[in-house]
Amino acid sequence: MATASPASGDESQTLLITLTGKDRPGVTSTMFSTLAAFGVTVLDIEQIVLRRRLVLGVLVTPPRDEASLRAALERVAGELEMQVEVLRGTGDNRERREGRSHVTVLGTPLRPAAVAAIAGRIADTGANIDRIERMARYPVTAIDLHVSGTHPDRLRVVLAEEAARQSVDVAVQPANLLRRGMRLIVMDVDSTLVQGEVIEMLADRAGCHAEVVAITEAAMRGELDFEQSLRARVALLRGLDATCLEQVYQGIVLAPGARTLVRTLKRLGYRFAIVSGGFSAIIDKIAADLGIDFAAANELEVVDGKLTGRILGDVVDRAGKADALRRFAEEAKVPQASTIAIGDGANDLDMLAAAGLGIAFNAKPVVQRAADAAVNVPYLDAIIYLLGISREEVEAADSEMGITTPAPPLA
């Protein structure tokens, strides 16, 4: 992380000091106390600790008495029982500011061959990995690579192909303020926020499950017009007692990690919306349960306590979902570029395209190809890692609220 540049520009001489060894309290303080005696200027610092092994890199301007500085560093390293290396060169890592991206890799498990392949494709584009951070090790392994030297769009294309070959998920985002700014997250409901399809649950009670499933699958593959298919499926529910809506709501199972996703990001000021080709009688209750700020869904007509098989008003279809995202962003006073959309089916494509970041969650192939990022693990809160938030940070915040999480396995 470059903090300043040498006074005479990129061709100025600099010293890179690297200290490695067993970590202990006071190492960083001792290093910089030593440097302070030589009148150098700090240009860049990186430090990482893995299993109590420290790697500390410091880039500084060279002092007038370089030999004395080298001797002092060797002496301090010996006292700390560590190793030090001092290399003279030019520049201050300014090139790391160009074409900067965050590349998040998710695996269950994450194997060395997959990491090697992803790193290889990054190198093939001429880019460099500047830093690697672990975001989570349970229930998925997630790592965040800080990459520089090529445009994020180019990286996204190359890494999407490699991710498919390696059976891992890879998301590429520009390294800019939008990743940390307040956002609006807009989610599909069926097979995204909740497990299964609500209309199929209603069809079970109406005795027309097979017919509804056949129409649903064709629509989600993009083979049928969504509005026509929805009206056809709803027509099959004619005569169903309206009390079944409450029964279906009570039987809904949220996607694993759904509550964690909403709870964590709402603490950070995020707003949430759900948009669905399903039905407001159920969607509105899910929104109230989770504390969702906005919701849009279709309204079933009920007469004398029975479903008529018709929908009231306009259908929330593929275009309607995108319109809802734009409307909710305006109401929340969030720029459209600061929105995130999450969905799994063809009727989510316009919404994913309209968002600043479109995420395909366990989605159909056509959706994965069109989205900015694809997440194929079954945990909805894995999306948190794409936003630069680690599992440890989530658990620490939950602990403060008295919420306990299962301990991860040692293996």
Image (cartoon, helix red, strand yellow):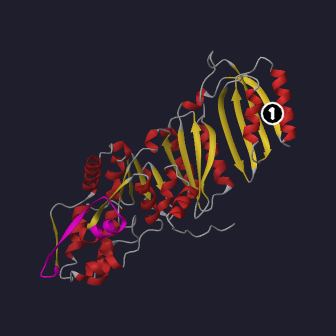
Residue found at x 33% / y 45%: 334
Q: Is residue 297 magenta?
A: yes
The quarter of the picture where the N terminus appears is top right
Residue found at x 12% / y 82%: 304
Q: Amino acid at mark 1?
A: Glu
Of residue 73 and residue 343, the one placed in the foreground of this image is 73
Of residue 16 and residue 79, the one placed in the foreground of this image is 79
Residue 232, percent from left and from top:
22, 70
Q: Is residue 57 magenta?
A: no
> Which residue has dot 1 on it?
85
Find residue 261 and report its image quarter.
bottom left
From where the camera sits, is residue 210 visible? no
Residue found at x 37% / y 75%: 252
From where the camera sits, is residue 395 visible? yes
Mark 1 lies on a secondary structure that is strand
Residue found at x 28% / y 79%: 246
The magenta segment: 283-306
Residue 168, percent from left and from top:
57, 56
Outermost residue toward the top? Answer: 8
Of residue 288 and residue 387, the one placed in the foreground of this image is 288
Outermost residue toward the left? Answer: 304
Find residue 131 and report its image quarter.
top right
Residue 74, percent from left and from top:
85, 33
Position of residue 179 in the picture relative to residue 233 (left or right): right
Residue 9, percent from left and from top:
61, 17
The quarter of the picture where the C terminus appears is bottom right
Q: Is disc 1 surrounded by few (<14), some (14 to 19) or many (20+) residues within 10 Å?
A: some
